[in-house]
Each structure stands twice: as C-alpha cells, then as structure tokens.
Amino acid sequence: MLDRFKSEGFTLIDCLIAVTMLAIVAGFAAPDLQAMHHSKEGRLTLRKIADAVHLARSSAIQTGHMVTLCPSADGRTCGGAWHNGMMVFEDKDNDHKMGDTDELLSHFQFPGLSGSLHWRAFQNRQYLQITPQGFTRYQNGNFTWCPSRDSKVTARQMIINRAGRVRYASDSDGDGLRENSQGEPIRCPG
C-alpha cells in the first residue's frame, strides 16, 4: 500500500547538483571552445584574402592591367584598416587609387571579425598590386590575423611571394606556434 505514494522523479537538490556539475564542466571547456572559434575565424579570414589575391592575379593576367588590393570599408576608396574590408580593382592608371577609369572587381568584408588583420610587405605600402604578368609589384609580404586577445597559438599568417602565390604559415617545429617565412613564431603587431 505504501508503494502507491512513492514518487519517481528528481528532487530540487538533485537538479541543483546536476546544474552545478554542468557549470563546472562548461567552465573548463569554455577556453578551449574560444580558442577553437578564434582559430576557425583566422583560417576563414585568410582564405577570403587568398580568394582576393587569386582574383587579383587572374584578373591582371586576363585583362593585361595592374590590379590593386587595398583596405576599404566602403568599397569605393582605399584607406583604413584591413579588417574593416578590402577591395580589389582593375587599376588602369597604376596609381593604387580607385579612379574614374578603374573597375571594381570585388569588395570583401569581414562582418563580426573579432580579431585584427595586418598587411606587412616589402616597401611598407598599405596596398598590394599585381602586375599583368601575375607577379606582385615588388611587394612580397604577409597578412597576419591576430585574435582579439593576445594568443600566439591562434594567430595565423598567409605569406605572398613575389610570384603572387600564397602559402599559410605552419607549425614546423611542433611547439604549437606557427612560424613566419623566417622560421620565427608569428608575432601580432601592437
């Protein structure tokens, strides 16, 4: 007769213990999830830039005109920070500025980007030009993506050689840090 009143369920204390345990486990997992998010964000950002470089290179070869990549938030003028956006345009007068005779090929944006993007090149110019032969205009260099918080582990870099070809920095010595073209760990500016 007493079995009829026996409850089959969880008490409030059982639920509180389960929620507390879940919170503790989530607290340990959160940094790893954030690092994974930063790593993916950096990888996707650099792939988008590689697409822009490939577009510039193929367009320069096809049209026989110089093609310029520059930072641009609005897709009309060069300037600002690379992580706010960039444009690729056929630069018919070779002045690395979007003019009346130039043709916009594409405007790339990075919505919601939590890190920053930096271009560092020979001759320290804040644009990249591709010649009609498909070469950079003496501007081999690299794009470095840095996470919003200082983390050398999730920093990524895309290296562009004189021939306009791209490659990604990798961890060649197994220490968990990607190395630049000189074999040194990637460093974020600033």
Image (cartoon, rainbow, N blue to C red):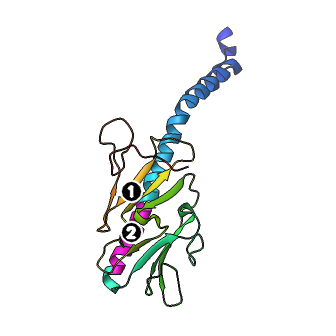
**Would you place residue 102 above or below residue 150 in this image?**
below
| 179 or 109, nearer to the observer | 179
Along the horizontal axis of the image, is 14 left or right of 184?
A: right
Three-letter code, disc 2: Val
Q: Position of residue 159 (x, y in %)?
A: 36, 58
Q: Position of residue 117 (x, y in %)?
A: 51, 57
**Would you place residue 103 above or below residue 140 in this image?**
below
Residue at numbered disc 2: 53
Q: Is residue 133 visible?
A: yes
| 134 or 115, nearer to the observer | 134
Q: Quadrant of the N terminus?
A: top right
Q: Residue at x 54, y 42 (%)?
A: 150
Q: Which element type, helix, strand or loop, lies under badge 1?
A: strand
Q: Which residues are magenta?
A: 47-60
Q: Which element type, helix, strand or loop, lies under badge 2?
A: helix
Residue 24, disc: none
Q: Residue at x 70, y 15 (%)?
A: 5
Along the horizontal axis of the image, is 130 left or right of 151?
A: left
Q: Is residue 10 visible?
A: no
Number of residues whose C-alpha sits closer than 10 Å to that of mark 2, classed few (under 14), some (14–19) or many (20 or more): many
Q: Earlier in the sequence, mark 2 or mark 1?
A: 2
Number of residues whose C-alpha sits closer than 10 Å to that of mark 1, classed few (under 14), some (14–19) or many (20 or more): many
Q: Main secondary structure of the magenta part?
A: helix
Residue at numbered disc 1: 158
Along the horizontal axis of the image, is 109 left or right of 92?
A: right
| 156 or 29, nearer to the observer | 156
Q: Position of residue 106 (x, y in %)?
A: 47, 76
Q: Position of residue 177 (x, y in %)?
A: 39, 40
